[in-house]
Image (spheres, rainbow, N blue to C red):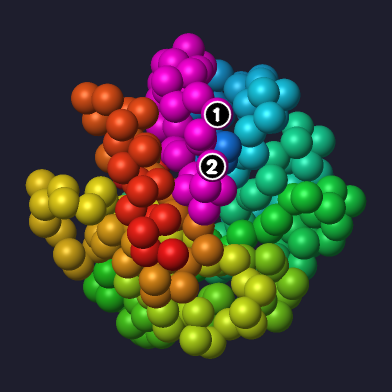
Amino acid sequence: MDSRIIVSLDFATASSAAGLVRQLGPAATFYKVGLQLLTAAGPSVVRELVDGGKRVFLDLKLLEIPSSVAAAVTAVGQIGASMVTVHASGGSAVLRSAVEAARHFPRLKVLALTVITSMDDEDLREVGVGSTVREQVLRLARLAVAAGCHGVVASPLEARMLRETLPSDTLIVTPGIQLAGDSKKGDHARFTTAAQAIGAGATHVVVGRPISRASNPADAFAALRAELSAAR
Ligand code: C5P
């Protein structure tokens, strides 16, 4: 078991998600459910994972008025998820309301999403943000920690900067992972290996297609675990 690996269930149906969970078996303990699967399959998909002994990162990317965010976080806690995301760009009041709602669920961690990894400096300018992506990630991460968030989501390329800046108990969750030895993506601007992300200070990595689209997902997951245990 390696609870630093969060397997992303980016599927259109509950049965295909359940298929991957079955294939990975007891070795995989932590799953991410995002907007696609939640919308298509409903909250029972989360409850079934939790009932099956798995931890669930519910990636809701909330950005709403504080009372609505608090209500959504309460619903997340009630279905037993372990992590939920809130957009840090919502500001302190939104982040604090999420943290306050999560207090009733001691296992629930609030992660602040800094800048989504598809955005570059030019995209930020378009929405009126003059800072670079790195500056904005750091600003929002500091804001999130000050508001009481348990962690942040950022690209692996920002992990080291965040690890060196944020308190040592802050969770740093990074998507954008490619398997070691897989040069197919070759997109070093956005992807790193899991070992590199953890080495840079990430506490968890989110991995989707490199596992779900592998010809043998269980083998791909085992290779990822081996990569991380070697890097430890
Ligand atoms: O690329 P992969 O299939 O591993 O993505 C898994 C999850 O990570 C996606 O659901 C998406 O939310 C997130 N992701 C991201 N930034 C990337 C790649 C993936 O936020 N560059």
Distance from the alpha carbon under mark 1 to that under mark 2? 8 Å
Q: If you read the primary sequence from the N terminus, does the residue marked by circle 1 or circle 2 appear first?
A: 2
Residue 215 in sight here: yes
Q: Quadrant of residue 56?
A: top right
Left or right placement of residue 166 versus residue 94 in this view: left
> Is 69 or 38 nearer to us in this picture?
38
Q: Is residue 25 magenta?
A: yes
Q: Amino acid at mark 2?
A: Met
Find residue 138 and report its horizontal and vertical position in percent.
48, 81
Left or right placement of residue 120 versus residue 4 in this view: left
Find residue 132 and report its horizontal and vertical position in percent.
33, 82
Q: Check disc 2: other Cα within 10 Å, few if <14, some if 14-19, many if 20+.
A: few
Quadrant holding the N terminus:
top right
Residue identified by numbered label 2: 1
Left or right placement of residue 205 versus residue 152 in this view: left
Are discs 1 and 2 less than 8 Å apart at CB?
yes
Q: Residue at x 76, y 67 (%)?
A: 96
Q: Secondary structure at mark 1?
A: helix
Q: Is residue 100 magenta?
A: no
Q: Residue at x 28, y 58 (%)?
A: 193
Q: Find residue 26 and name its label.
A: 1
The answer to whether residue 213 is above or below residue 15 is below
Residue 155 in sight here: no
Q: Which residues are magenta?
A: 1-28
Q: Secondary structure at mark 2?
A: loop
Q: Amino acid at mark 1?
A: Pro
